[in-house]
Each structure stands twice: as structure tokens, then as C-alpha cells.
Amino acid sequence: MGRLGRFARTAAVAVAVTALAPAVAQARGDGLWKVYDRALSDARYIDLTHDITPDIPVWKGFGPSKFAPAVDPLTGQPYTFAANGFEATSYQLATDQLGTQLDPPAHWAPEYPAIDELPPTYAVRPLVVISIVPQVRQDPKYALQVADVRRFERAHGRIPADSVVMVRSDWSERWTEDPAGAKALAADPAFPGVGLDALKFLHRKRHILFHGHEPLDTDTTPTLEGEYWLMHHGFAQAEGVDNLDGVPATGCLVSIGYPKFKGGLGGYARYVAICPPRTGKGVRISRRDAPLPRFDTPLHWDEQRGHRAR
């Protein structure tokens, strides 16, 4: 056999081995477990989600929500640990636009998907955090501009396609559970936003999955032009995001979870940043994750707060 023949046979064997590699790995039980072992088991996890309370800041057009102990319909009495061995909670939620959210495009454009129609591929994505904190200190109503995105890319590299871009403004530091404070915060017209041109650039030029911001609206324009454009072009967005100050600008993933309400126009979402082990903030996977630790103070209904507390 000549040199070319031997080369062809070697190449064929290499191609065959490469094609079989995924099957061999799967047969050994590796699959994506190796990804977890090598990258996720030692990662830092940062919750980007506000707690939902009855006094959470909410747009004035939706009104307040109410929490109460769940009641046995036969007796009219709340379930108790002493009498029933368990307790439960009744949630009277004024809207699905509450707290940390995932807005599906059907929120404004019914011809596009509702919350239950979003694909499961939203579950984990690369995370990018662009800070406009210095600009907001100078102007509380500052909105992210294309120039900010380009400046970010000069420092950190091109924003990857299919990623989630969170815009850090530190507006979430004003978040409160105080009823008067929550109402005032939701009604304050001076909040940072994301400019329409920046949104178009991120989606049309960088092809991101969606963006997120800390306030309850995309921008302060009279028509909410940014949100209008997003929803009417089939894009989702995250609102009411928290704790972005602890997340590196690049190098993290974001886990995205939300209730799957049938035909839902908004989603109470939970976002968790999964960051490299060297990240200063966040928690690591622990043996105490299961079983979970026991508290010294039991959970109980707090009439003044309107929810369970310790």
C-alpha cells in the first residue's frame, strides 16, 4: 500500500473514532456530568432575584397583592402544624408583572409567545453584565447607549450571540419591603433605562437572547418605546433584577426559571448567575444543601408583615 493509501486509511479510522466518541462517552455514563464536575460543582452561585412580598414595589396600575394562611374549605379554618401536620399559603396576586420578572413578548403583542410558549432552551445561557453605574450617578434617568456597549466590548470583547445581557445600574439598592417606600419607589419617574438604539444594536447586531434591567420598566419615554419595540419584534426581557454588583462582566452563565402559567403574559422569574470559583460573591454547592439545615427559630405567620417569617 502506498503512502497515500495509508494516509487515507488512517484518516478514515480517525473520522470513525471521532464519530463514535459521543456514543462511547455516553456509554461510560459521562455525558454532561463531566461539565458539571469540571465547571459547575466548584462555581459560585449568585441569586439575582428579589423576594416576593405583599409590599413589593409594583406599578400603581396593578395594585397590591395579599398573602394569607390557606384555609380548609370544610372548616373555614387555616391549616396548622399542630392540628394538620402542615401549613400552606394562599396568594392573591394582583398581576403577573410582579417582582423579578421575565416578560414574554405576548405581554404587549398577542401574536407572539406567552410565558408557557417560551422554549426550554432559555434555561441556561452565557451572561454579560454591562454597568452604567457611573452614568446613573450623574443622571438618575440615564439610559444605556450604543456607545456604552461598544466601550464595553473594547474592554471585554465581543458580546456572544445567544447570550443574556444584564444592565447594572444599582437601582435595586433602593428596593424596599416598606409599604410606603415601595409605593414611592414604583411611582418615581427618575429611574435608569435601556435606550432603544442600544436594544436594537444588541438584538440585530449581537443577536442576544434577551436583556435585563433592575427597574420595573425598560425606559422612561412616554410610550415605553423600548419595551414596545422588543415585544412587537418577538423579544423577551428581564425586569426587577437584583445583585448584579457581585457578578463579573463576563465569564458567568445565567440559570433562568419561571412558573409556566398557561397563556401567561408575565413570569415571576428566578435568575441565578453561575460564576467562576474565584468570584468574590455568591455561595458554593455544599453538603448542607441536602438535607437542608435546621433553623433555631421556626417559620410562623407574621400579621404585621403579612407573610411568614422567622
Image (cartoon, helix red, strand yellow):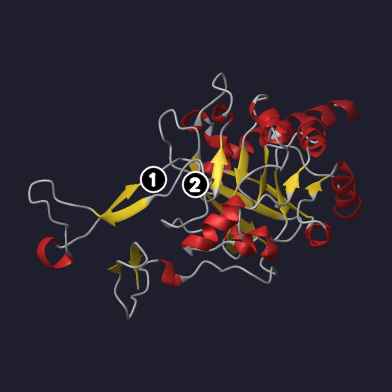
- Number of the label disc, if any, that sits on residue 93: 1
Question: Disc 1 residue type?
Answer: Leu
Identified at 52% across, 54% down, the residue is 57
Q: Residue 198, position in %: x, y?
A: 81, 39
Instruction: Determine which quarter of the picture holds residue 67.
Output: bottom left
Identified at 61% across, 53% down, the residue is 241
Instruction: Determine which quarter of the picture holds residue 250.
Output: bottom right
In the rendered structure, are the residues bearing label 2 and label 1 in contact, judged by CB atoms less than 8 Å apart? yes
Q: Residue 193, position in %: x, y?
A: 73, 47
SS for tag 1?
loop
Q: Nearer the viewer, residue 194 or 82?
A: 194
SS for tag 2?
loop
Q: Nearer the viewer, residue 114 or 52?
A: 52
Q: Nearer the viewer, residue 57 or 283?
A: 57
Q: On the image, numbered disc 2 is attached to which residue? A: 98
Q: Quick check: 140 above or below 294?
A: above
10 Å crowding of disc 1: few (<14), some (14-19), many (20+): some
Tell me how far mark 2 sits from mark 1, CA to CA.
8 Å
- Among the two numbered marks 2 and 1 on one chain, the one whose residue lies closer to the N terminus: 1
Can residue 49 be seen here? The reply is: no
- Report the label total: 2
Q: Nearer the viewer, residue 214 or 247?
A: 214
